[in-house]
Amino acid sequence: MSSQMRQVMRRTALLVSGRAAWVTAHRGKIVEGDMKGASDWQTCTACKQSQRGLATGATGRAAVETNINSKMASRFGVVQQGPPIEVFALNKAFLDDTFENKVNLGVGAYRTEEGKPWVLPVVRQVERDMAANETLNHEYLPVLGLDSFSAAATKMLLGSNVAIDEGRAFGIQTLSGTGALRVGAEFLARQLGYKTFYFSQPTWENHRLLFLNAGFNDPREYRYWDQNKRGLDFDGMIADLKNAPENSVIILHACAHNPTGSDPTQEQWKEIANVMKEKKLFPFLDCAYQGFASGDLEKDAWASRFFVEQGFELFVAQSFAKNFGLYNERVGNLTVVMSSKEAIAPVKSQLTLLVRGMYSNPPNHGGRIVSTVLNDPKLFEEWKTCIKTMADRILLMRDSLRNKLLELKTPGTWDHITQQIGMFSYTGLTTKQVEHLVNVYHIYLLKSGRINMCGLTTKNVEYVAKAIHDAVTKFP
Ligand SMILES: Cc1ncc(COP(=O)(O)O)c(C=O)c1O
């Protein structure tokens, strides 16, 4: 409900109670029929009630207050309606839509060629084994989670890395990528007193809220997307980083930038690192799509590893939601890299207190699945074939959509569809064009024009391409 709507409802409640107050105040003084007109009570000059509908006469006001206090008041009445979260609201609208050929390009999760969620076969297998394993129980995990999980996750991210060899990198199990970002941000705000953070414009819609809730109070954007080029605004990004105050936390998407699908090249990453080193900025990499982006775990980890090799102290938030399809199991890892191993014990102790006071300890199920797979060479190979399957299907859909748009001679250039990587494509469609797709074609996508490539299938891609063609030609 919008705040405007809420205000209307609140006013209506006041009007109703005010009307009741008027009746109370005039009981015995009015004849039946005087109250028939809906606004009689508002215009009563005898008790000087105002045109605005709020009782201003002493009797009326007292009665209204008594009425509110006794019957309608709630301590929660002061709570303002918050705005809906676009991606969840969109998903609900999709589910409620009864149109047969509706298409969901909004949701941020993998879908098969049949448009269904996919439980990876290797995950199913491990779950079966876990269910049959009577040595497993439901005891609490340690506050920082399963060591076997976080060590393997950190290794998967950093590879054979000097920071691991020197014992100055470690991971802690968190509530998925969001939890890793939140714990990391709260640590930086509380322990190091950092208050300024930068996120790309545009970025994943949760970064801002999450850092503010964690105690940061100075949110800033760096330029990232060039709408004309339909690609990275690298000069803008560098200029903004150069102007950032020392110790600003810079949120960087480690690979497969959400929502644009446009990543810096390796040369550009080098320049970003140089500026960040020079300006003493703190890199907080957000790695939600390792392996899922290109199909290759090593390739997708390149930027994170490069920053560590450059000697940065940094945090990386890892999510296993996408690459393991474990969205609702909340499996994540916060990798911490420091320049000295002496700092590890105090940092871990503060992270322990932070998590203890936040959610006490993480859940077991998903973390154990990931740990089992990453620590078993055979299962690990099987999992890699699964991520390849997902990445390849996305690439196929990118090709199909672009080809269909070219066949239809849809105005504009569509090369960015295949140039972008990862699950999302930032189509460049305008708000009006998006509205047309949703309202006329029942194709659901974010207002920004971001689409999830997995929502496309060989069966619906033509329908979507024709709809985009129509939207682009009708609303150029
Ligand atoms: C860029 C980015 N970071 C972090 C996340 C966190 O996801 P989760 O908390 O489900 O791991 C997402 C999920 O969509 C994302 O796109």
Image (cartoon, helix red, strand yellow):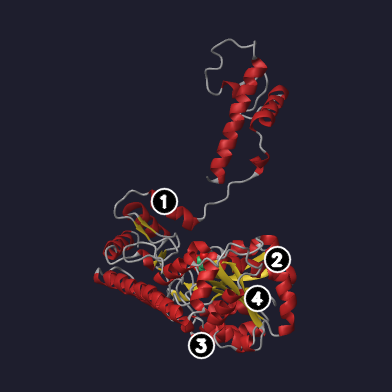
- The residue carrying mark 4 has its beta carbon less than 8 Å from ligand 1: no
> Percent from the top left, x then y, of residue 56?
69, 27
> Percent from the top left, x then y, of residue 444?
38, 57
Find disc 2 in the rendering and name its residue: 354
Question: Disc 3 or 1, which lies upstream in sequence?
Answer: 1
| Label 4: element kind | loop
Q: Which mark is residue 244?
A: 4
**Residue that extends furthest to the front in the rendered view of this protein:** 134
Find disc 1 in the rendering and name its residue: 93
Disc 3 vs disc 4: Cβ atoms closer than 8 Å?
no
Find disc 3 in the rendering and name its residue: 267
At 52% from the left and 55% from the top, the residue drawn is: 85
Disc 2 vs disc 1: Cβ atoms closer than 8 Å?
no
Q: Residues within 10 Å of mark 1 (few under 14, many from 20)?
A: some
At 51% from the left and 74% from the top, the residue drawn is: 372
Nearest the camera: 379 or 446?
379
